[in-house]
Image (spheres, helix red, strand yellow):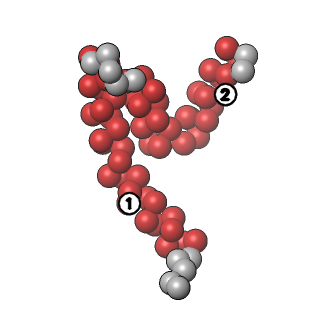
Amino acid sequence: MNRKTLREEIREFQTHKQKLIPILIVVGLLGLVLPIIPGVAVLFLAFMLLFPKHGEQLLRRIRQTIKI
């Protein structure tokens, strides 16, 4: 059984993340036009992958605002 090191897993996630973000942005923009796709949620996910610190702060503010 070939176990990956944590460093290898992080590198692999980074490459997958870089490929996933543009797809999420396109799907999110389509979701703003098409009622089937939740556009804002997909765009928020892309934002959180692109800017993790700012995404966490924004999520915290949203939770405080709606008191979850």
Residue 35, above or below 55: above
Mark 2 burial class by Cα count in 10 Å: few <14, some 14-19, many 20+: few
Identity, as a three-letter code, of the amino acid under mark 2? Arg
Q: Residue at x 30, y 42 (%)?
A: 22
Q: Using the image, tell me which numbered label, if any, was put on residue 31.
A: none
Q: Is residue 39 left or right of residue 56?
A: left
Q: Using the image, tell me which numbered label, if any, was put on residue 60.
A: 2
Q: Residue at x 27, y 18 (%)?
A: 34
Instruction: Examine the rendering and report whether any part of residue 68 can be seen.
Output: yes
Q: Residue 43 in the image: x percent, y percent? A: 40, 30
Q: Residue at x 53, y 85 (%)?
A: 1
Q: Is residue 61 left or right of residue 35?
A: right
**Which quadrant of the figure has residue 35?**
top left
Instruction: Examine the rendering and report whether any part of residue 47 can be seen.
Output: no
Q: Secondary structure at mark 1?
A: helix
Mark 2 and mark 1: Cα distance apart in space = 27 Å
Identity, as a three-letter code, of the amino acid under mark 1? Thr
Q: Residue at x 67, y 22 (%)?
A: 63
Q: Residue 21 in the image: x percent, y percent? A: 36, 44
Q: Is residue 62 left or right of residue 46?
A: right
Mark 1 burial class by Cα count in 10 Å: few <14, some 14-19, many 20+: few
Q: Which residue is mark 1?
A: 15
**Which quadrant of the figure has residue 67?**
top right
Q: Earlier in the sequence, mark 2 or mark 1?
A: 1
